Image (spheres, rainbow, N blue to C red):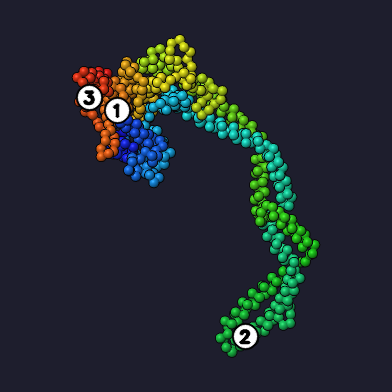
Amino acid sequence: MLKTLTVENFALIENVTVEFGGGLNILTGETGAGKSILIEALGAILGNRLGASKIRKGADYLRVEAIFSDGLKITRKVSRTGKNSIAAGGKSITLAQLKKIGEQLLDMHDQNKNLELLREENIYALTDDEKISEELKIFRRLYRELNSKIFSLEKKLSARAENLERLDFLRWQAREISALNLKPDEDEKLEAEIKKLSHAEKIAEHIQESVQLLNDGDPDVLSALARVAKNLDDVARYDNKLDSARKLLEEAEFSLREAYEEIRGYGGGLEFSTERLDELQARADEISKLKQKYGASVNEILKRLEKIRADIEAAENFDSDVEELQKEIAELERQTKSSAEKLLRLRQDSAKNLSTAIETEIQRLGMARAQFEIVVEPSEKLSTNGGDKAEIFFCANFGEERLPLSKVVSGGELSRIALAIKIVSATERRGDFERVMIFDEIDTGLGGVTAKTVAEAISRISRGRQVLCITHLPQIASMADVHLQITKSEFDGRTLTKVKRLDQDERIKEIARMASGEESTVAIKNAREMISSAKNFKA
């Protein structure tokens, strides 16, 4: 519920705070008093365009602030400098975010809004109750999944020729790599062996020299060690202080003999073959060519081969994947169509009941012979709304052909049709029941019995929800739970608009003025009777 609306520096309004109540809030006043400014201010909360041209003369900014019963405060400020701001719940928001919030809080009912009745999505908003909404969720899930599968299939089929070319290329790559029969770490082992064979003569020279120095030459290290050991043995007869040195020599001699045997054995097995070197280098060249295409090492090339083989398997399964997708699509189509047919039946039942109820209300609103019907029929194609199409048909006069609402209805008729729909929606708690409903001069062109009927209809809508209504008709004003009078006056050379909440006596005078243009005894008596009659109706 909207608790207060504060408007500052907006056109004729300098600073006004309007306090609203529950039920039906009526706003009345002379033409030009500023009622439309309040509607524009409410439109600002809905996210409507608001420019600096609306700023009151002499002010630097305008501000609109709405406070709702749940504590939510929405503030919108527009300055002449172009520095504008919007806040909701104390946080800055964008205009797009404001529109989403505003649509959930306020429902503006005017000529432009009435035209929205002609849009199919708004017809569905009427027909789709909770049961239909649940089925629609199921349908939309199936519909999304179906479209996703169809897209995947189309993508696959369009890539069929490309897939065949890719498969040939992958097989060629696999053959090229497999032909070398690579082994893990082969390139590193090859490099080590090539390096060894390339320097075989130099290695042999070093081995031969080392063997000679250790034991086969003259002199050699081992023979020299033996002589030193013999000398120390002779010294030990006279002094044992060199025993530790003697042990170190024994260990050194043992280690050197081991080294000698290993070096001599390596030299004995050393072979040099130019044919072998050529063979290894040729192998290395082949591997190098593969590295340029598939990876920096043999191990990387082998990993690439695994990936290529996996891609080949996936490509070879192309036709089976297509067949599987086609089966899935066929099943999803069956399920989606079944859900669409269920939606159609549910909507047709709902539309039938709803049409009867709305037609009854239209007839109460002064079009006694009017015919109204929401027609839901199967459509040729599925859409996010299902497999049907919805349209409103109307006939204002008995015996005439029912035609689409957009082709036959006048502005006044459309206004009453919209009102009838709001009455039924409110009664059945459909759609936007929780939003504040705003009627902007719905009484245009009405009078007499019809005006009284419209007044009663608006009063019925306000049972259990907040309604704001700007009106020139005393019949509607007499139904008010809260009556707000909008006036303008001149002060200090400026025109000011003010809003006042009327008490009972003030209400009687205002309704008398609206009914007859004066506050005569007869007019006052008539106003009292109208208020009493309205009170009895509401009771």
Disc ID at residue 30 = 1
Residue 131, can we see it?
Answer: no
Q: Residue at x 48, y 25 (%)?
A: 120
Q: Residue at x 63, y 77 (%)?
A: 252
Q: Which of marks 3 and 1 is in front?
A: 1
In the current view of this chain or complex, which residue is farthest to the front?
A: 493
Crowding at mark 2 (Cα within 10 Å: few <14, some 14-19, many 20+): some
Q: Position of residue 164 (x, y in %)?
A: 70, 39
Image quarter hosting the C terminus: top left
Q: Mark 2 points at which residue?
A: 232
Who comes first in sequence, dot 3 or dot 1? 1
Q: How far apart are marks 2 and 3 (CA)?
A: 142 Å
Q: Nearer the viewer, mark 2 or mark 3?
A: 3
* Left or right for 503, reference 55: left
Q: How many labels does the image show?
A: 3
Q: Mark 3 points at which residue?
A: 509
Q: In the image, what residue type sits under mark 1?
A: Glu
Q: Quadrant of residue 6?
A: top left
Who comes first in sequence, dot 2 or dot 3? 2
Is residue 42 positioned above or below 127 on the image?
below
Q: Distance between the residues labelled 3 and 1?
A: 14 Å
Q: Position of residue 340 (x, y in %)?
A: 51, 24
* Left or right for 170, reference 431: right
CB under 8 Å between discs 1 and 2: no
Q: In which quarter of the image is residue 422?
A: top left
What SS does tag 2 mark?
Answer: helix
Q: Position of residue 237 (x, y in %)?
A: 60, 88
Viewer-proximal residue among 97 and 470:
470
Q: How far apart are marks 1 and 2 (CA)?
A: 136 Å
What SS does tag 3 mark?
Answer: helix
Q: Which residue is drawn at 34% across and 44% down?
A: 60
Q: Quadrant of residue 61?
A: top left
